[in-house]
Structures are given as C-alpha cells and as structure tokens.
Image (cartoon, rainbow, N blue to C red):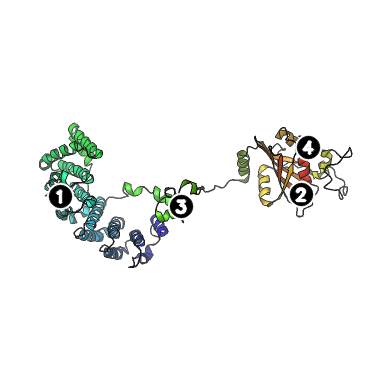
Amino acid sequence: LAHILIIAKIKQGIFDSDYRVFFVRYNDPSQVSRMKVELLSLVSNATNVKEILAELAEYVSGTDPELSKQTVKAIGEICYRVPGGSSVGMDHLIDLLQVENEYIRGEAAISIRDLLRRYPDLRHQVLPLLRKCLNISMVDSYSQSRGRSAVIWMVGEFGQEIVEAPYMLETLVDSYYDSLTVTEKLELLTAVLKLFFLRPPEVKSMLGRLMVLTLDDNSNQNLHDRALLYYRLLKVSPASAKKVIIGDKQTLGKIEGEFAEDKDTSLRDAIFSEFDTLAVLFNEQSDSFILPEYRVGKVKPLEWVSPEDRLAQEMEEIGLSASISPPPNEYYGNNTIQLEEGKYNSVNLLDLGESDGHNKEPISNESKRYLILGPNLSSSQFQNLWEKLGTGLNIKREVSSIPESTKSVDTNLNQLNIKTIASGNKPDSMRFFFYAYDLDSEVYLLQCSLMKKTRCLDLLIKTSKKESDEMETTIADIITRIFASS
C-alpha cells in the first residue's frame, strides 16, 4: 500500500477508477487506514469527488484522533486540488468547525485557512463564524494552537470585511501573557499590523501596546526580531511597511499554480529511487535508519559506452599504456612468412621445456613454427572478441626474474608474432594484453598479470579454435621464457 501511495503521488490519475478499493474497513490497522485516507485524497477527481468526500466525512467521528485529523486534512486537500470540489468540501469543513471535539475544530480551521489562500472568494461562507470560532478556541488546550493561529490569520487577512475584527484581536492582546503560544503571538503580530493599514483609527492604540509587549518579550528570539523589524519599517516608511506586509492585493480571486511548500519533491523523489525497499514503508531515506556499515552502495545507472571507449577506460584504470602494435587494418597473412605445406603437421607442441645443450633452437625460430602474422586488431576489435570468446583457459607460471620494463617484453614478443594491445607497469605488478595467430589463422587473446613480489605469472587465454590442441600451453611457455629473459 505504501508503494501504491508513492506511485499515486508521482503519477496522478493512475488509480482514480479504483477509488472504492481504498475505502477504510472496520478491521483495518491504524497505519493502513491512514494510508487509505491519504490515497483517497490523491485519487479523487471531478467525477468521484462527492462520493469520496461523503465517505471521508464518516471517518472524522472515529475513535482514532490521528485518523480523524488526517481525514479533515484530506478533505481540505481535495477541496483545493479537485476542480468543483471546493464548494462541496467547504460545507463539510464549516460543519466540522463547529463540532465539540477540539482537535477536529483545530484541523478544520487549518484546512479552511489553506483553502482560502487558494480560493479567497469562498471567504463569505466562513467570516460570519470566525468570532464564535475564536471564542471557542480560547478554551482549547495549548496543543491546538495551530488551529487558533489559523483563525487569527483569517481575521487579519480579511479584517476589513469583519466589523468586529479589531475587538476580536484586542481580546488576544489583553491575554498576551496568559494563554498565547509563540506561534499565536507571531500570527497575532502580523494580523494586527495588517489590520492597522486597513483600519488605522481603531487599531493604532492596540498596535502600540502589542509592539511594547513583543519588544519586551525575550522568551523567543524570532518573535523579538520580527517585532523589531516591523517597528523599524514603520518608523522609516509606513508606505514601505504596508507594501512589505500586505503586498499588492488588486483582486481577490482564485490563485493558480502551486504554493511554495507543495513544490519541494526532493524527499519524495529520493524515496522513489529506493522503490521496493523499507525506505518507502518508513517514508524516509534508507540512510536515516541503516547504519553506515550495513548500507548497500547506490549504483548509478550505467550509460552506454562503445567497446573501444570501455576498453580505453579499463586500461586507464589499471595504468596501461596504449597499444604499441602496428596500426589496424594492415594484413600480413601467410604470404609474408612462407610456410611449406605439411612441414609442421607432426610437430611436438610440448617440445619447448627445459633441455640441455646446443640442440635447442632460438626462441624466435621456435615460435614462428607455431605462430604466424595475421590481421592486426584494434582495441575495439580486441574488446569485442574478448567478450565473444567466453571464459577462456587460466594458466599460472612462475618466472625466474622480473623484466626490466614492459617495453622490453613488448619488443621481444612482437618479434615472435605475439602482438601487444596494451601494457602497464605498476609498483607491485605488470599487466599486458596480447594476441597471436596459429598456423590455421585462429586467433588467441591473452590477458597477462605478473606479480613482482611472488614472481607469479597469471595468464588468461581465449581462442577462436573449436577444439583445444594445447597451443595455449605452448604460448604460455613462450611468454614465460620471454619474461625471464627480458
């Protein structure tokens, strides 16, 4: 259900036709009921708004205070989000504004305030009730101060149309130290100042008393600073103060667009990026409830990279240099090195091990009995072949000495028809990428790593040959001897 909720927030309208599924059942757990109420506010539209509002009105009188408050809030959200729902929803909110339950009254006042911010022309239904609402709210507990603050805002905002507005606010000024919270004092200061610019003779004395009270009040820095700001604005330029506090209200009609507090979707988007995790259920990013040592790394989506660029990136990561082989698209073929037909059919491919005396052929001559010059490969061609040729054969050798440099290895192997794609020399290791061709023009790709501390040579060989003829072992022996002699 939490995942449906976040989808409904991002893709509005997708569940509108299934709104009855989200009606609260008598045996639903509290958390499920609250999510269903929130979903009902999101799936409402012009065709089902009346039925959903009637259903929500039934939930307000329940025994769960949190569900009742959320239901009132959902009614308000439907009113200013769904076209045509404001007039129907306002009737429900006005009824709730007069119930005996104080937390329902407080939430209804907040919803009406938000609704009037978007639809100021609906104020005529509410203004006659504000005097009664303010009197009732004064006996409510401090926990309902947000509801009283909403009533104070409405009195200040539309005070010019309320005959008793100055006297309603004066009662609050007289009880400044007795029953007002900081939130209410901040709202009262702004409301009295707004009313002063609309009805100066009636409010001037009250504003002076309130300024003295707030400037002397050191219980809250924000309250003291705001009173000081208003005082200095009035002292320097009352016209500028009026422009700052009231603004330019040429017309009172429907306000189009979103409010600033509705535009920030960063948290919602961050949670959606962790879809199908507990972050959606807790409505928090996983970093807030998972210890650092147990967090899974968040991997960014991979962008498509061409094989040639990917190989270049891999080479750069391990410190490999560019290929020293001749440029691609040059073909040497069998016409460069003439091979007599049938001469090497019975050659012993393992006759490259240790042997005594001078009967042993030079490595270059031996190698050319098994390897020929073939088409040169570019880095992209090498990468494509490497991916196509499968897992390959892993061979490990131990060399008697470490080569002086990668250049000497590259040069010596190049003379033996083993070409280098890339090579790199690090403090603890050397790495190479080679390729070669056998007598049947089958290609062999090699990845070679030499650990300097252990003198361990690790070769991974891949070939296009269908059946193994132990040529991989032969090439491994040739490379091992070249490493030892370079």
Is there any visible trace of residue 60 in the rendered image? Answer: yes
Q: Quadrant of residue 192?
A: top left
How far apart marks 3 and 2 lie (CA) works out to 48 Å
Q: Quadrant of residue 455?
A: top right
Whether the residues at callouts 1 and 2 have beta carbons within 8 Å, the answer is no
Numbered disc in front, either 1 or 2 = 2
Q: Mark 2 belongs to which amino acid?
A: Glu
Among numbered discs 4 and 1, the one appearing first in the sequence: 1
**Residue that appears at 60% across and 39% down:** 317
| Circle number at residue 161 | 1
How far apart marks 1 and 2 lie (CA) works out to 94 Å
Q: Secondary structure at mark 4?
A: helix
Which of these two is toward me, 469 or 339?
469
Among numbered discs 4 and 2, the one appearing first in the sequence: 4
Write down the residue under mark 3: 274
| Circle number at residue 179 | none
